[in-house]
Amino acid sequence: MSAASKRQLITLATTLVASVALPQQPLAIDQTFRTHIINVNVNDVLPRNDGNLIISGYFRFQGDNILTTHNGALLNHSGGRLPDFPEANFLSGKLVPWNDMFYGTNGRISRHFMDGTLDPIYVAPNSTLTDYAILQGGDYHVFQDGRALISGVYTYPLGNDNDIYSFLWLDDHGFVDTTKIQRRADGSIYWFKELPDGKFICYGGITEYEGTPVSLIFRIEADGSLDTTFNVPPLDLGEAYTYYPTADGKVVVGGFFHFVNAPDTVNLIRLLPNGQLDPTFNSNTDYNANFINSPALYYYASVSCILPIGNDRLIITGGFDEVEGQARGGMAMLDSAGNLLDDYFTGAGCGEYTYYPGVDTSNNYKYRSIDGIKPTADGEYYIFGAYQGYDDGTTNDTLQRFVSRLYGLNVGINELDKFNPKPLAIAPNPTAGSALLSVEAPLQNAQLTLHDASGRVALQMAWPAGSAQCQLPTGTLAPGAYVANVRTGANTRYSGRLVVLP
């Protein structure tokens, strides 16, 4: 066989292998993953590096007794439940990775190893050593050193019902940090997020913070004091579930809101650095929730998660079934100005689910919601919430339940591995802050390059000369999956996948 014929055969074989390995299309449903959850809600997921998935919420599996409810579980890469994950009654809420561990919450936060067991040096949720009491839980943020900021309504010191706080600072062992000033409001602060400058944007059912009148959405300084330069127009209704800070100091906020004297409720807004509405963002995009047999006379459509894709697109998820009159069951793709796009998620989306079916028909109401979307280290995505069935516009999989996996945006990624590089160690991964990259020996004249899921260069920097480690700042990166390559000359020496969390 001639050399030319061999090249043609190799090319043909490579093309055939690639055609078999490629998914149906980016962001399409992966039908190799199906859970056996039958109700009620999955509130969060945490992909592990081994391909398994930690989930939290309130849910039952097929075969469970009607009185059985799980708060935490571990699923394998096909969606089956793994039995060796401990029953965790304190994993009903948000999951936050930290180093090679993670934080969970069921009102009081806890710290766990990745196998689900509690960290013995962190005060356990049911411990008698706790020094504060919970009146109403809220949100929490974990700092890189293991400290945390928690919101809600708390009494501190324990047993002193006159000292009520809405923000408490905890040390890296879970006790109240007495070196910080604990903060007060006239109600509970439900959701908040750290901004790139260290400040926090917050939502609470309050009218005053530290004695000063505030809107339902407000901003605090890094030490917890009120930022008086940020003033959101008055709201008489609403909840802010999710925030996405942009590189220019603005913040996209999702939920449902009604501004005083406004003609209608809105679900996605962008705030200027001073808190005012950004007029260049389409806040009037119409979201609807036409659910059957709602337990109330009305139901507000809501946006519960924002995931940026590159610099020009946003995936939003939530409790809605229409956007701009088009079917979008729980998930939609928008441009950076908030306008609906028609190239992804054009099917009916997630299917309706009947909460608590039974004899009492007042509880037999329909619901459909995708509460969030999270990337994995391999560039795939998990969606989760309360739904049965999922139609992405190409495939209608009626057997999807509560957690589903989508193919990633892996265009151009395979090309980056052509030099057969060695694995690049990255920790923590996924990360919500900086990450430490490590190789087996010190490097000279090396370059670090990060490519986003579409193959574009997202960051490029010199590797520290004479070092085997590099501290990677991720504050300027949009949440999502990246490929990190370390090159010397024309060769890629090391490569690894990194996931940046919102």
Image (tube, rainbow, N blue to C red):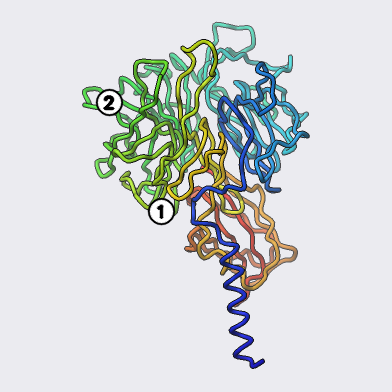
Task: Point out which mark residue 26 bears.
Answer: none
Q: CA distance from mark 1 to mark 2?
A: 28 Å
Q: Label 2 crowding class (10 Å Cα cut-off): few <14, some 14-19, many 20+?
A: some
Name the quadrant containing residue 300: top left
Which residue lies under the disc numbered 1?
311
The image shows residue 77, relative to residue 495, as above or below, that is above
Give 234 or 337, whichever is nearer the viewer: 337
Mark 1 and mark 2 residues within 8 Å of each other at the beta carbon: no
Side of 236 where 479 appears, left or right:
right
Q: Label 1 crowding class (10 Å Cα cut-off): few <14, some 14-19, many 20+?
A: few
x and y percentages locating residue 74 in the rendered image: 69, 36
Side of 444 where 459 appears, left or right:
left
Q: Quadrant of the N terminus?
A: bottom right
Residue at 75% in and 63% down: 440
Side of 55 where 226 appears, left or right:
left
Mark 2: which amino acid? Phe
x and y percentages locating residue 357 in the rendered image: 53, 18
Residue at 36% in and 46% down: 334
The image shows residue 397, relative to residue 40, as above or below, that is below
x and y percentages locating residue 328 in the rendered image: 38, 40
Q: Determine the secondary structure under disc 2.
A: strand
Task: Point out which mark residue 259 bears.
Answer: 2
Q: Quick one: label 1 or label 2, which is nearer the N terminus?
A: 2
Residue 177 appears anywhere in the view: no
Mark 1: which amino acid? Asn
Residue 226 appears anywhere in the view: yes
